[in-house]
Image: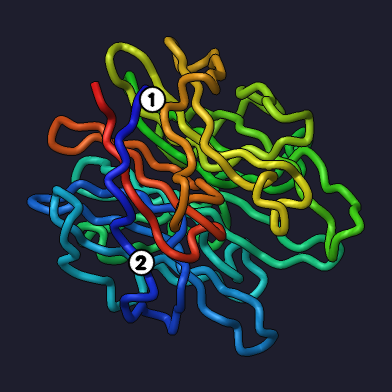
Amino acid sequence: MKWKKLGRIFNPIDYKLANNCVEFAQSPQTLICDGFVRIYFSTRETDKKNGKFLSHISFVDMTMDFRTVLNISEKVVIKLGELGTFDEHGIFPINVVKDKNRILAYTCGWSRRVAVSVETSTGLAISNDNGLTFNKIGHGPVLTSSPNEPFLVGDSFVTAFDEMYHMLYIFGTKWINTSEEEPARVYKIGQATSPDGINWIKEEGKQIISDFLNSDECQALPTIIYHNNRYHMYFCYREATGFRKDKTRGYRLGYAYSDDLKRWTRDEVNVGINFSDEGWDSEMMCYPHIFKCEEKVYLLYNGNEFGRYGFGIAVLEE
């Protein structure tokens, strides 16, 4: 895999976002429409109750060459959860899937905790208006903690192959007490299948991507595509601690491949893309999304400070 960077295509500080959100356009995810591309992302509103962030979903519509912004969402795309629900304090990320005449959205809902900072689970919402808005199928998640995956289930990426829904997701393996302000979390990539996109069978507690840094490596936001007779996965990974102050411990992009969607081979040598020498993606690359548009393969990703300054795009060089 070899990528040509086309540069940053969206910076949230240049636009007025819904929900009083400022900065951040995290985890860009595409919906290919008739004549344009809709890119969903998570942005942040300051919670007036405590000064913490609430993550909301917005979108930007762009021309199919990704050079021009056509429209920015003005309405609430999907509502946050009610008091006590799994997505009360934010949705990040969202993964959209075309499913006949409707669009499915797999969400990662965030809820704050006391002993640790957060808990996450995967929810499902459906759009019948071409992705302008989504309504949840219920107040609870479709994929959540279980005996061998006790916390931090989320970052779900769903696609359909061979009349079966396939999901890649992350699950927490432990929390670490550190000298930092709060405990640090460790999470790995797992996979699940479903006949209907609602009821999922997990390979309980099975880590499908080997560690590269160490056993406490954090792996996030898997995304896959079938191209040239092989399944290709991109994701991001970082050290469990110290990543907020030391850029060498922060997120970077990783790559793996598979011939059967079951066994994955990690291949860091052939990631094909790396940090820029300077600028918005010179210190961090994270939250990738791989997709096809007009017979080309593209990779969206965030840069420095977890997507505070938007997202860019690269095209695969055949």
Tell me the SS state at disc 1: strand
- Residue 297 lies in quadrant: top left
The mark lying in front, picked from 1 and 2, is 2
CB under 8 Å between discs 1 and 2: no
To which residue does mark 2 refer?
11
Q: Position of residue 182 (x, y in %)?
A: 83, 62
| Residue found at the very far left of the displayed protein | 35
Amino acid carrying label 1: it is Met
To which residue does mark 1 refer?
164
Amino acid carrying label 2: it is Asn
Query: 10 Å neighbourhood of mark 1: few (<14), some, or many (≥20)?
Result: few
- Which residue: 67% across, 35% down? 188
| 283 relative to 80, above or below | above
| Residue found at the very far front of the displayed protein | 277
Q: CA distance from mark 1 to mark 2?
A: 36 Å
- Residue 82 lies in quadrant: bottom right
